[in-house]
Image (tube, rainbow, N blue to C red):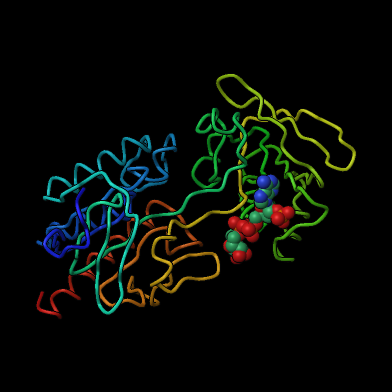
Amino acid sequence: MEDSNKNSNIEKVHCLIIGSGPAGYTAAIYAARAGLKPVMYQGLQPGGQLMITNDVENYPGYPDGIMGPQMMEDFQKQAARFGTDIRFGLVTKVDFSNGAHKVTVDDTHTLQADAVIISTGASAKWLGLPSEQRLNGFGVSACAVCDGFFYRGTDVVVVGAGDTACEEASYLSKICSKVYMLVRRDQMRASQIMQNRVKNIPNIEILWNTETEEILGEHAVEAVRVKNVQTGELRDIPAKGFFVAIGHQPNSDVFKPYLDMDTAGYIVTEKGSTRTNVEGVFACGDVQDNVYRQAVTAAGTGCMAALDAERYLAAKGL
Ligand code: NDP
């Protein structure tokens, strides 16, 4: 087996991009066109969260919309066209101590990069029901802004009681007939102002002490079976959309020993840039953004990361 600790086995690269969603591919396009010879490791889910999305209708430049996986294939082709070295592999360890930019992939191969761009994204938290997995993309979604439009004029269900759930419910209330909010306790976690907002919207009905038992429907969501945890009563709510809004998890664990993060694990970047607290390491996309979380904003910060990396390398004479 390869000994990744031996210096001779360490591969030297100029610009290393970790993660392959809209942020990573955009960083790759800019870095490759700037002559930085980027090497990209795609991670566990090449293409990222858009691979589990159907139509994307809010990305400018696609007047008829585009399927998420198709869009990511196009991003990948564009990154490859300018020479990005795109590889399968998951980063399992990093060493950013004392100016090192060492990254180990699949526990076997170690690289040393002049600059590192992190675009590992975030993953929506799911309830973990088999029906939720089966109907993902067929009525089950974790993003109202992305998918709410498909359920206009219908009844939908939102699960969660934090600020995200309130925001999703209030967004959906403008386009859907009725929004049911499932709150598992007798109170919400959301800020008071957000709670008040949803409580005052006439077509939002909050079901307290209520959990999801099952999502019903063979090929698409047709109803949601819910259970009142105090009475044990079961009830089927007819609905076409089921929006899970119980939080996101940034994919940042592997960088924890070295990078500044907020309490939820989002990488902290300097305001107005993608610079992290480690020189030569940049972060873009959802791994550093718990506010906007859109493909277009991720792509925008991916571009920023490549420009920041290019300037850093030029200033260092690398
Ligand atoms: P939170 O962690 O704040 O809330 C998650 C919610 O999901 C909680 O109500 C929790 O219930 C519920 N939940 C968790 N697991 C389950 C489950 N298995 N079944 C049912 N319900 C479940 O996540 P958010 O994404 O809402 O917010 C993350 C952060 O981002 C927060 O700090 C928030 O303030 C911030 N934010 C701010 C916004 C703004 O200011 N505009 C907008 C969106 C987010 P319980 O309470 O019972 O644990």
Image quarter of residue 92: bottom left
Of residues 232 and 302, the one drawn nearer to the viewer in this rendering: 232
**Is 96 left, or right, of 31 in this rendering?**
right
Residue 70 in sight in this render = yes
Residue farthest toward the top in the current orientation of the protein: 218
Quarter occupied by the C terminus: bottom left
The x and y percentages for residue 279 are 28, 77
Quick check: which quadrant has ligand 1?
bottom right
Q: Position of residue 109 (x, y in %)?
A: 22, 53
In the picture shown, does residue 271 fall above or below 43?
below
**Residue located 70% across and 41% down the image:** 179
Left or right of residue 63, residue 249 in this image = right
Asked if 92 appears above or below 212 in the picture, the reply is below
Q: Residue 260 in the image: state x and y as whole percent.
A: 43, 74
Q: For the image shown, how many numbered marks are present on the structure?
A: 0
Q: Quadrant of residue 238?
A: top right
Residue 271 screen position, x and y as percent: 40, 77
